[in-house]
Amino acid sequence: MPFTVKAAVIALAINIAWGGNTVAVKFGLESVPPLWSGFIRFGLGLGCVVLWARCLKLPLIPRRSDWLPLAALSGVFTVQIVLMNVGLLGTSAGAAAVLIATHPLFAAVLAHYFIARDRLTVQRSVGLAVAFAGTAYLLLDSASGGGSWTLIGNALVLLSAVLLGVRLVLTARVVTEREPAFVITWQMLLSLPVFLVGALIFEPLAEWKPIEWPALLGLLYQGLVVAGLGFMTLAYLLKRYAASTTVSFGFVTPVSGVGLGVLLLDEPFTLALLVGVTAVGIGLILIARSAH
């Protein structure tokens, strides 16, 4: 089906919304620690996705052969979110948005080796090189001028992006015959006990700060808009249009994250952020175009 103006507007809007995720996490972390933040976020998101699946009468009961890949995907998913949330304690929302947006780059490299007919082309390789150069510049800047905790925060977020790329490739390899709702539901559901147990052990409720409105709105945004509405919108687009066209709007996400960080959190717009977001955006565009 040809990509319509309506579809383009929806894809643009959802990628802008995803850019706001790191900002929302920063707001949430002002009152709620990282593990509790993940538990609340995916508890809300799970409710949205299950409701979506039930409305469409999509099957959610796993077969015996599903359990091992689902456990692997959920494990990667849980660690990835923990790394991102903890990393955001030490870095800015804008820098995190740029770094987490590199996940398609890692997915492209892994797909070259693990997914048939998904090989790196010259254009993809150039896109990877440009994006990684911008990422390296951002990391080097945090090492020289941002302090050790900023560097650690950025490194954790980048590792989270690596795991997100791994998760995309795992999903493509082991559950391609399943509905997206099935995969997302079980990733979230299997992660919730881990978040809860970890939070009870490492983040006692007595150590919570008073929950202010910005933190509450940040948690609701993560759970309902990103984990809930974001998934449902992406599923809608992928069922009707080519995946390569749909994901080509991903370059907007880091731009949105940097802009919203400056606007809502009063974060400085540095040269390193400008170089990073520009390079990653160009890299994502080149990779997306090579898929057509």
Image (cartoon, helix red, strand yellow):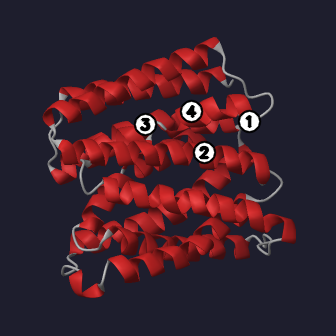
Q: CA distance from mark 1 to mark 3?
A: 28 Å
Amino acid type at circle 4 is Ser
Residue at 70 percent across and 51 percent down: it is: 171
Residue topped by disc 2:
166
Amino acid type at circle 2 is Val
Q: Answer few, some or many: residues within 10 Å of disc 1's Cα (few below 14, many 20 plus, some between 14 and 19).
A: some
50 with respect to 261 (left or right): right
Determine whether the residue tagged by mark 3 lies in a helix, strand or loop. Answer: helix
Amino acid type at circle 1 is Phe
Q: Position of residue 62 (x, y in %)?
A: 80, 72
Q: CA distance from mark 1 to mark 2?
A: 11 Å
Q: Position of residue 126 (x, y in %)?
A: 53, 15
Disc on the earlier residue, 1 or 2: 1
Residue topped by disc 3:
252
Kindly identify which numbered label has been placed on residue 248: 4
Q: Answer few, some or many: residues within 10 Å of disc 4's Cα (few below 14, many 20 plus, some between 14 and 19).
A: some
Disc on the earlier residue, 2 or 4: 2
Residue topped by disc 1:
114
